[in-house]
Amino acid sequence: MVPLSSFHSANLPEIVQAGRVLRERSQRPDSVIYLDSGRVLFGLLESGQLRHQLGMVEGPVWLDAAPVLMDQSYPLDIVADTQVSLRRISLAEFRQAYAGLSKETQTLVRDMAAGYFQQTELAVSRLAQDAEARCAQWLLRNAAPAEDGSLQVTLQQRKRLIAAQLGIAPETFSRVLRHLREHGLISGTGNVLSLPQPTALQNVARC
């Protein structure tokens, strides 16, 4: 990987206490973190707590270079498990140093980053099955009778806030709603959703 010595000495160490969220999933990278020492956890946060832990690393190590190399948002939340010492490297500095590597090394590093993303997406997709059950439970819990006797849910909050309550990423919430719609378990447009098959939706909620 790109050696830390490639970077300007102005990247001074930063001490961060345990429990601090270093990166939030779905955000675009604004820098790259080099972890000098300490331990961090990778996973999915729910109500400020790391309910789903999917990995752990200890410094010294590059912490989040893969999203930058793949030009992707962060796939996971990153939380300091102990007090850590880290350095934040600007995207311009990191990309310049990466461009200075041999073509063979660039290809190797990028392939490793791609493999990391494939494994992470697989792990998150498995958790999404649980997310579908939680979404179904939320819909049933917030359902009310409509004038025609059917059940409907009025989304009184932004989908991002609802997703946060469920402990899932906004795009996961949107994906689950799309899946339920494709299977005829919800319908409607805008902020009002109809539940034409509440019994089938209950079966999903119990999964």
Image (cartoon, helix red, strand yellow):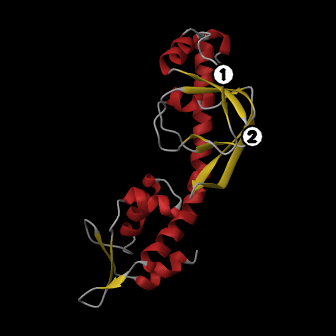
Using the image as rendered, state which of residue 102 and residue 84 is in the foreground.
Answer: 84
The residue that mark 1 highlights is 13
Vertical placement of 166 versus 27: above or below? below
Q: Are marks 2 and 1 in contact (CB under 8 Å)?
A: no
User: Dot 1 lies on which element?
Assistant: loop
> Residue 41 is drawn in which quadrant?
top right
* Residue 158 horizontal side relative to residue 6, left or right: left
Residue nearest the viewer, comparing 185 with 84? 84
* Nearest the eye: 27 or 188: 27
How many numbered discs sit on the rendered protein? 2
Q: Answer above or below: position of 89 versus 147.
A: above
The percent coordinates of residue 64 (x first, y second) are 60, 32
Residue 67 position in % (x across, y down): 53, 33
CA separation in Å, label 2 and label 1: 16 Å
**Badge 2 is on which residue?**
82
Image quadrant containing the N terminus: top right
Q: Earlier in the sequence, mark 2 or mark 1?
A: 1
Q: Residue at x 28, y 67 (%)?
A: 191
- Looking at the rendered structure, the kind of residue marked 2 is Thr
Looking at the rendered structure, which numbered label has been put on residue 187?
none
| Residue type beneath disc 1 | Pro
Q: Residue at x 64, y 31 (%)?
A: 63
